[in-house]
Image: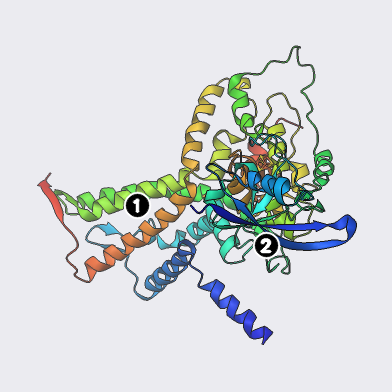
């Protein structure tokens, strides 16, 4: 590996009317360096006006999401030596830029509000108890660090207008639907307001999730099958009409 | 000038190396041609998999394949290019084209479950074909290369079918509270076991189709007199 790498960052400052443009920086490399280290080097040694959001530098907080060489990644989890001698870094395209690499992801809180919340079965004795066998499936979904990389890579979210919630929120819906103490079924919501039909199961979300959540296989497709149960399967509707209301 | 450029880029996209999808297209066209022009249903006790149990079920099998989540992913990506790749779309090619996902015509894919039922019902016939190939000469039990191929074919079709996402839902995926069922831990075990297979569903979908076509070609080769069969043993019964 060479001892220098060119980092090309898409910079902009909408508040000052500064249009997006790439700026190249030469950064000396070190053993085990990650892309976020390189960005910090630039911030500390070349241009302190560069803005970047980060927090844990351990792939736990989900703050340092960006598009590295065109693919959404956590900058703190992406090794420089794996990315070639010229690395491009851009802010997530699905969201409005605040400055440089910092985006405003608050739209996700609006989406989260649309999801029918956890509704416990009535009359459950307290304290609530859950069997281990019932939580293994939704446990996978609870590892989500809300980095929004999956939302960013989803072509439905970033290239089209629709009411689709997006993969990260599908993970949330699946976690609620598969909760053993929850009493409502969100298939109806997904089929209409949730826009799940817009997902064409092309699995980009699953490919980029830093937590390795099988978003499409374990959350979206099972939810699509629940929609099938309710809206497309007369035999299923007759035979085992879901007990949930 | 601009138009020309656009056409060129379309052609280069068409031939972009995507071996899995385009090899499938070629294979399907070739085998469809062969099926209609030179039908072969059985030769020396080997039943062609396209004819098992009868060529009349082929349309349903085709619909089972077409509505399978694995193939859906492939054609949404490589035929309709929504999206072409997960990398960001520099040319904004996708956003300029209308997209309805699986809400319009492709909402029909929601009927996958029915085709799955048909696929499941047909599976035993492939094992029966294997059996037939062993005993086709009356009074003898004969074990040949072709029988192994028929068995491999049957096994792969089984793996593809039982790793189906619709099946996953039906055998326990729809349950939210396993401990609430009297036989819940059994259901959960079944679901977990199926989930292991389900991880490889795309691979099974692809390989099983390749093998169906390979077996078809093998039987054709035999008919053409190629020396590709070998008898391991033959015993009188
Ligand atoms: S699988 Fe669905 S949610 Fe995931 S990226 Fe593709 S279209 Fe978006
Ligand atoms: S599901 Fe994965 S990619 Fe999506 S927000 Fe959660 S951790 Fe990030
Ligand atoms: S999902 Fe592929 S066969 Fe059902």
**Badge 2: few (under 14), some or many (20 or more) residues near its Cα, within 10 Å?**
few
Q: Secondary structure at mark 2?
A: helix
Where residue A211 appears, as percent x and y from the top left, is 61, 38
- Pointer 2 indicates a residue of which chain? B
Q: Secondary structure at mark 1?
A: helix
Quadrant where the N terminus of chain B sits is: bottom right
Residue corresponding to mark 1: B153
Residue corresponding to mark 2: B105
Q: Is residue A185 above or below residue B1?
A: above
Identity of the residue furthest to the top in this view: A126
Q: Tell me which residue sits at (73%, 60%) in the image.
A: A159
Left or right for A9, reference B62: right
Where residue A58 appears, as percent x and y from the top left, is 63, 35
Kindly tell me whether residue A149 is visible in this rendering: no
Question: Which residue is nearer to you in this view: B209 or A97?
Answer: A97
Question: Which residue is nearer to you in this view: A64 or B177?
Answer: A64
């Amino acid at each position: 590996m060479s001892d220098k790498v060119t980092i090309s960052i898409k910079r902009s400052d909408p508040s000052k009317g500064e249009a997006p443009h790439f700026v190249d920086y030469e950064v000396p490399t070190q053993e085990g360096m990650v892309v976020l280290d390189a960005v910090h080097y630039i911030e500390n040694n070349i241009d302190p006006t560069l803005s970047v959001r980060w927090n844990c530098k351990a792939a736990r907080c989900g703050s340092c999401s960006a598009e590295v060489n065109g693919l959404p990644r956590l900058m703190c989890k992406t090794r420089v030596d794996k990315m070639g001698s010229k690395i491009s870094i851009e802010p997530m395209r699905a969201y409005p830029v605040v400055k440089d690499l910092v985006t405003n992801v608050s739209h996700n809180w609006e989406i989260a509000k649309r999801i029918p919340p956890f509704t416990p079965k009535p009359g459950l004795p307290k304290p609530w108890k859950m069997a281990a066998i019932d939580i293994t499936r939704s446990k996978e979904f609870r590892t989500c660090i809300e980095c929004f990389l999956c939302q960013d890579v989803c072509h439905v979210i970033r290239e089209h207008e629709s009411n689709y919630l997006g993969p990260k929120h599908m993970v949330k819906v699946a976690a609620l639907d598969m909760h053993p103490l929850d009493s409502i079924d969100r298939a109806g919501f997904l089929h209409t307001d949730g826009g799940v039909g817009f997902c064409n199961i092309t699995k980009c979300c699953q490919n980029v999730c830093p937590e390795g959540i099988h978003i499409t296989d374990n959350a979206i497709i099972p939810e699509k099958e629940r929609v099938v149960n309710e809206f497309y399967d007369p035999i299923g509707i007759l035979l085992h009409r879901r007990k949930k209301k | 000038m601009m138009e020309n450029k656009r056409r060129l880029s379309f052609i280069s996209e068409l031939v972009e190396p995507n071996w899995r999808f385009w090899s499938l297209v070629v294979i399907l066209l070739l085998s469809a041609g062969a099926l209609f022009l030179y039908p072969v249903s059985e030769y020396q006790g080997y039943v062609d998999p396209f004819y098992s149990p009868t060529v009349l079920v082929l349309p349903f099998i085709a619909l089972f394949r077409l509505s399978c989540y694995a193939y859906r992913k492939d054609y949404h990506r490589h035929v309709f290019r929504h999206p072409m790749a997960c990398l960001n779309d520099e040319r904004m090619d996708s956003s300029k084209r209308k997209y309805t996902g699986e809400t319009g015509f492709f909402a029909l894919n929601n009927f996958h479950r029915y085709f799955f039922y048909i696929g499941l019902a047909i599976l035993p016939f492939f094992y029966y074909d294997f059996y037939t190939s062993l005993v086709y000469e009356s009074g003898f039990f004969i074990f040949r290369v072709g029988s192994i191929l028929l068995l491999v074919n049957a096994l792969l079709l089984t793996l593809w079918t039982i790793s189906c996402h619709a099946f996953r839902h039906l055998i326990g995926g729809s349950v939210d509270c396993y401990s609430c069922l009297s036989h819940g831990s059994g259901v959960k075990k079944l679901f977990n076991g199926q989930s292991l297979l389900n991880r490889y569903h795309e691979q099974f979908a692809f390989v099983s189709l390749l093998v169906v076509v390979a077996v078809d070609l093998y039987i054709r080769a035999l008919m053409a007199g190629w020396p590709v069969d070998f008898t391991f043993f033959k015993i009188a019964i």
